[in-house]
Image (spheres, rainbow, N blue to C red):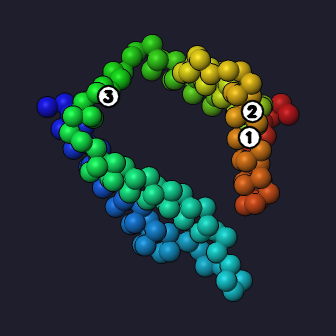
């Protein structure tokens, strides 16, 4: 019973992802993206198109996996129940992140909060991997948003 419910749920979620991304890719992004005065310039539509493309790919992969998984295998995976302690930790971390963002900015806040969150939710993860992952993410965000899209990340009032 649980196995067929999980497969049915995965199938439904995959269809929602596919439909959602196609609506955005085909209709909403082209209809609501401001037209550039420069011929051939698509800069304002690039990021939304990439994001919707990723969601579309994930939806298709999820659909294929839900269709190809034998009925007996998906029952082995039991969904984690919502634990109040973990939920409280997430809410506290998010609140602290939002408050700190105004004072010390995006990069400092993310450099402090991301390792804490990764260590809390995956205690077996080594610190050097957490540090490398955090550094890669921050450099990627800087290159993509600050340099590539000319979007300034919040700096904070103390910095």
Instruction: State how far apart marks 1 and 3 are (Cα).
Output: 31 Å
1 or 3: tag closer to the N-terminus: 3
Crowding near the residue tagged with mark 2, few <14, some 14–19, many ≥20 C-alpha atoms within 10 Å: few
The picture places residue 141, in percent across and down from the top left corner, at: 72, 47
Q: Nearer the viewer, residue 44 or 55?
A: 55
Q: Nearer the viewer, residue 38 or 124?
A: 124
> Residue 26 falls in which quadrant of the image?
bottom left
* Residue 126 shows in the view: yes
Residue 61 vertical position relative to residue 107 in the rendered view, above or below:
below
Q: Is residue 85 left or right of residue 33?
A: left
2 or 3: tag closer to the N-terminus: 3
Instruction: State how far apart marks 2 and 1 are (Cα).
Output: 6 Å
- Give me the disc on residue 77: 3
Q: Give the residue pinned by disc 1.
A: 136
Q: Give the residue pinned by disc 2.
A: 132
Identify which residue is drawn at 50% across, 74% down. 30
Circles 2 and 1, Cβ within 8 Å, touching? The answer is: yes
Q: Is residue 123 left or right of residue 137?
A: left
Crowding near the residue tagged with mark 1, few <14, some 14–19, many ≥20 C-alpha atoms within 10 Å: few
């Amino acid at each position: 019973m649980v196995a067929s419910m999980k497969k049915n749920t995965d199938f439904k979620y995959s269809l929602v992802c596919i439909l959602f991304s196609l609506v955005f890719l085909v209709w909403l992004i082209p209809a609501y993206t401001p037209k550039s005065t420069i011929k051939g310039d698509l800069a304002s539509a690039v990021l939304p198109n990439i994001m919707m493309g990723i969601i579309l790919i994930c939806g298709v992969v999820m659909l294929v996996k839900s269709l190809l998984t034998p009925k007996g295998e998906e029952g082995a995976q039991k969904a984690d129940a919502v634990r109040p302690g973990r939920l409280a930790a997430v809410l506290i971390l998010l609140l602290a992140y939002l408050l700190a963002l105004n004072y010390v900015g995006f990069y400092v806040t993310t450099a402090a909060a991301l390792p804490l969150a990764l260590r809390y939710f995956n205690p077996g993860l080594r610190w050097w991997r957490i540090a490398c992952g955090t550094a890669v993410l921050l450099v990627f965000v800087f290159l993509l948003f600050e340099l590539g899209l000319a979007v300034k990340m919040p700096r904070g009032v103390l910095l």
